[in-house]
Amino acid sequence: MEVLDKDIEKLIGHIYSKDNDLGNQTFTGNVGYRWKFRRNIDETTLFKGHFFWIDNVGVPARQAVIDLFDNKVAAECGQSLLHDHKCFWLVAKDGFYFAKNSPDNWEFKYPWPGL
């Protein structure tokens, strides 16, 4: 799983699951954050991202919580207990995009709340 920042000068993402808190990650100009994991046997693995778009004065201009990985994303990505595939999220000024296998062919998924 990888999260990329497209065009937001300062983006902070808190990435976590029930069992793993990956902490706050600061994204600046096309620098991403990557992590690996295995789905649990019950296929209930859920990773969330709480994203903060920080404005020029250091205040969150927008924030959103999205499911970065759940059963729906696993199906789109082709994940199974036996096969791993790469999934990518792109955070942009207009919202959140998803791609599988390689970071291209982005599909728009969610706008920032309030847009």
Image (cartoon, grey):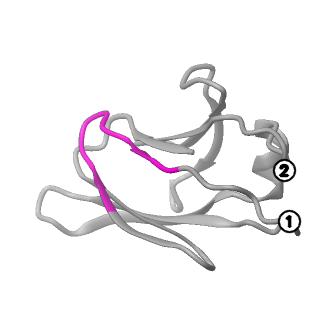
Q: Position of residue 114 (x, y in %)?
A: 51, 61
Look at 85% across and 63% down and name the residue there: 43
Q: Position of residue 18 (x, y in %)?
A: 63, 79
Q: Position of residue 69 (x, y in %)?
A: 68, 56
Nearest the camera: 82 or 58? 82
Look at 31% across and 33% down and name the residue there: 30
Which image quadrant for residue 44? bottom right
Taking the image as shown, residue 76 lies to the left or right of residue 106, namely: right
Report the residue marked by disc 2: 81
Label 1 secondary element = loop
The outermost residue toward the top is 105
Q: Is residue 55 shown in magenta?
A: no
User: How far apart are labels 1 and 2 at the CA level?
Assistant: 7 Å
Which image quadrant for residue 82? top right
The disc at residue 112 is none
Nearest the camera: 17 or 112? 17
- In magenta, the rendered stretch is 25-35
Label 2 secondary element = loop
Look at 75% across and 58% down and name the residue there: 39
Kind of residue indicated by mark 1: Ile
Kind of residue indicated by mark 2: Leu
- Asked if the residues shown at circle 1 and circle 2 are in contact, with their CB atoms under 8 angstroms apart, the answer is yes
The disc at residue 41 is 1
Taking the image as shown, residue 33 lies to the left or right of residue 72, namely: left
Nearest the camera: 54 or 28? 28
The outermost residue toward the left is 57
Q: Position of residue 16 (x, y in %)?
A: 52, 70
10 Å neighbourhood of mark 1: few (<14), some, or many (≥20)? few
Q: Is residue 67 above or below residue 105?
A: below
The outermost residue toward the bottom is 18
Q: Quadrant of the N terminus?
A: top right
10 Å neighbourhood of mark 2: few (<14), some, or many (≥20)? few
